[in-house]
Image: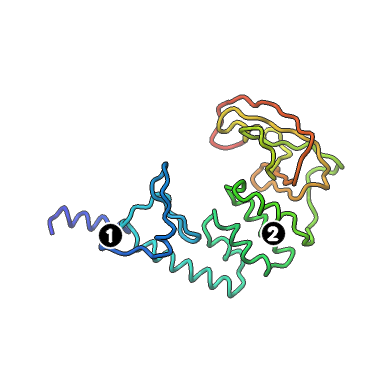
Amino acid sequence: MTKMQKAVEAYKETFGFDTEPVELHPDLEASLVETELFGTMLKHPLVFDAFYVKGMYDKRLNEMLRSRQEAVNKAFVEKEWPSYIFLHERPYRLDAFVDIEEHLGDAEYWEFLANVWTDTENAWQNLDVWRKLWNSFRTRPPLELPVDTRFVTIYRGVRDLTHDGLSWTLNRDSAKWFGNRFGSGYLLEATVLTSDILFYSNERNEEEVLLNAVNKISVTPVPEQRHKNSKD
């Protein structure tokens, strides 16, 4: 082996790359997806890789799958439901919640559903599932809103005039931020009964509320403007 070959092997070992050929686990192989933007991506419920390169670290991915499977099975047997859910990769945590919802008491159901909702980045892809879950007939905990009125004004920032989403906010500035974070958008505004609100959270300082349907919406264009990296 030449000095260069030794150096390459040492580099691979240092950074966890495969030093000898390893077959990717069949479950992971079946989860490879070709994309125009990122090339090959690995999208498995327990293992995710946005920039998969065949043969680079298949051994590590196989080990990650084995370890995660063991942990998920253990969490299920021991009824450690938060661990079971969040051992799954983010796009699959809703599915994980659905898998175990029948094992949850009412308080756990609403707590874990709220946690998964707050964590998700693709609610629009599963809107029907979210609507069904948020409209469960389970006993709900008291809704702690920062207002004590029969009616409340809510806002939603959108890129186009689509308002069939669940998520709105009590904060006009927050809605405007969402409306033009990717360019000029629109600010939707409506007045609703507080009793129609399904969920409220200010965990991300967004004063988010969820509603099934909203009528009599006013629309205001939001001009594009520069933003800081985070909302103040």
Q: Residue at x 62, y 55 (%)?
A: 116
User: Residue 159 at x, y = what percent?
Assistant: 61, 33
From the viewer's perspective, tell me whether residue 194 is left or right of residue 206.
Answer: right
Return the residue found at the far bottom.
77
Between marks 2 and 1, how big is the CA–CA gap?
43 Å
In the picture, the quarter occupied by the C terminus is: top right
Return the residue found at the far right.
150
- Count of marks, rendered view: 2
As shown in the figure, which amino acid type bears the numbered disc 2? Glu
User: Residue 3 at x, y = what percent?
Assistant: 14, 55
Tell me the number on the disc at residue 13: 1
Can residue 174 be seen here? The reply is: no
Q: Residue at x 55, y 32 (%)?
A: 182
Between residues 160 and 177, which one lies in front from this camera angle?
A: 160
Callout 1: SS: helix
Q: Residue at x 60, y 36 (%)?
A: 231
Tell me the number on the disc at residue 50: none
Task: Name the residue that disc number 2 marks.
Answer: 111
User: Residue 22 at x, y = what percent?
Assistant: 30, 64
Return the residue found at the far left.
2
From the viewer's perspective, tell me whether residue 31 is left or right of residue 217.
Answer: left
Disc 1 crowd, CA 10 A, few/some/many (<14, 14-19, 20+): few
Task: Give residue 77's quadrant in the image.
Answer: bottom right
